[in-house]
Image: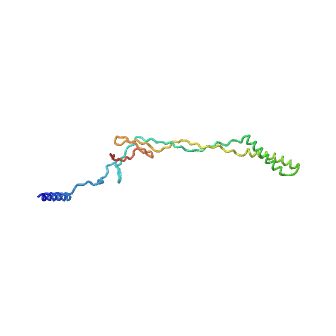
Amino acid sequence: MNKPPLLLLLLLLLASGLAQAESPVPTASYPPPNFPPPPGLHSGANSYPKFSAPVISAEPAYKTEYFERRICNPPAPPSETQNAVGTVLGGVVGGILGNQVGRGRGRTAATVIGAVGGAVAGNAVSTTLPSTPECRTVSEPQQVIVGYDVVYDFSGQRGHVRLPTRPGPSIIVEVRPEVL
């Protein structure tokens, strides 16, 4: 006796499920259908709505970068010590070369003439050789613009953004919903 009511109950539940499956259920389509955007609203495929916002101010944003530069002082004129060293070395070399020439008193005369000529030549060479300039590398700071800090008005609220270039009188603002 217990079995027929249970069977009847199962048949009723099954019949009601089939009836609900056949009835149309209203569903929302996602994404919503494309409606034309209102005037002033720019919207592209798969993007958030965009609006034009007037710029209140645009100030350059700076960053300090260091640039290396080489500074060279002009070479100093030859000193008295350089001239003396050139004269002595020239005299020694000239004397050695003069000593290689002749015999006896001729050799002595050639040595003296070679020493004097070498001293004159050494002095002349030491005064004409340029000395090496003193150079050093310095690192100098320089301010470089990295963008522009822009303040704009959007629906009575002020917004801030950094842009890579100076904006015009208005900018395009993309409106995104907040995620909680």
Residue 139 located left or right of residue 51:
right
Image x and y of residue 19, in percent: 18, 58
User: Residue at (78%, 44%) from the top-left corner?
Assistant: 88
Query: Which quarter of the rendering shows the N terminus?
Result: bottom left
Q: How is the image coloured?
A: rainbow
Q: Is residue 11 above or below residue 70?
A: below
Image x and y of residue 98, in percent: 82, 49
Q: Is residue 156 above or below residue 100?
A: above
Q: Residue furthest left?
A: 1
- Camera-nearest residue between 25 and 54: 25
- Camera-nearest residue between 96 and 128: 96
Image x and y of residue 134, in percent: 65, 43
Can you tell which quarter of the image residue 80 is in? top right
User: Residue at (67%, 43%) from the top-left corner?
Assistant: 75
User: Residue at (56%, 42%) from the top-left corner?
Assistant: 139
So how many labels did they put on this image? 0
- Camera-nearest residue between 95 and 139: 95
Q: Is residue 45 above or below residue 71?
A: below
Query: Which quarter of the rendering shows the C terminus?
Result: top left
Q: Is residue 168 above or below residue 34?
A: above
Residue 27 located left or right of residue 142:
left
Can you tell which quarter of the image residue 45 is in? bottom left
- Camera-nearest residue between 14 and 155: 14
Q: Residue furthest right?
A: 105
Image x and y of residue 66, in percent: 54, 43
Residue 160 located left or right of residue 124:
left
Residue 97 located left or right of residue 50:
right
